[in-house]
Image (cartoon, grey):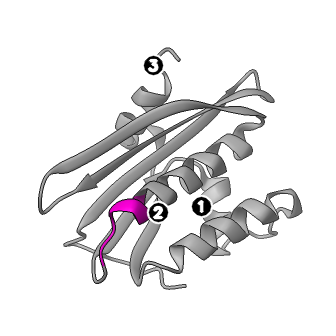
Amino acid sequence: MKNKSALPDADWHAAFDGSCSPNPGRCRIAGVLRHLPTGASFQWARNAGEGDSSDAEYQALIALLREMERHYQAGQSVRIQGDSQVVIQDVLGTASRPAAVLAAYREEAQAILSRFPDWQLRWVPRHRNQEADQLLRQPA
């Protein structure tokens, strides 16, 4: 797994978000994927079953990574952001204690990320993740 600290000229910028209402409850996930050299953009939001906020955030990240796999070409760099510290620290292995209940999600996300040689996954506050957050809040 390679998580570069800076990708100033990333080919792909992506954002994900997930939420539950109530928590736990009905999950909804959203993602935005943008290819900077061509301007191509892909956005989606959908319901994702039942769970808690960590389930929703992980499902959103994994769905985004799967979408990325459909468009990615060898040698491209990827920058991904989300507003869930729990999920991002869990994937990166920087959490003080990995959550056992999230292990299957973590393994799947890490497996997909391993297919991208140059990637960055970083936490941003919700106000800097507005595009994915707004998609998430649109009516189903």
Identify the main secondary structure in magenta: helix
- In the displayed structure, does residue 82 sit left or right of residue 99? left
Q: Residues within 10 Å of mark 1 (few under 14, many from 20)?
A: many
Q: Which residue is mark 2?
A: 122
Q: Which residue is mark 1?
A: 88
Mark 1 and mark 2 in contact? Answer it, CB < 8 Å. Answer: yes
Q: At label 3, which amino acid type do we have? A: Gln
Q: At label 2, which amino acid type do we have? A: Arg
Q: Give x and y (percent) for residue 31.
A: 44, 43
- In the displayed structure, does residue 61 sit left or right of residue 104? left
Quadrant in which the N terminus is drawn: bottom right
Circle nearer the N terminus (3, 1): 1
| Residue projecting furthest to the left | 38
Task: Choose top left, top right, bottom left or bottom right for residue 132.
Answer: top left
Q: Is residue 67 above or below residue 108?
A: above
Residue range (magenta): 68-73
- In the displayed structure, does residue 89 sit left or right of residue 45? right
Q: Residues within 10 Å of mark 2 (few under 14, many from 20)?
A: some
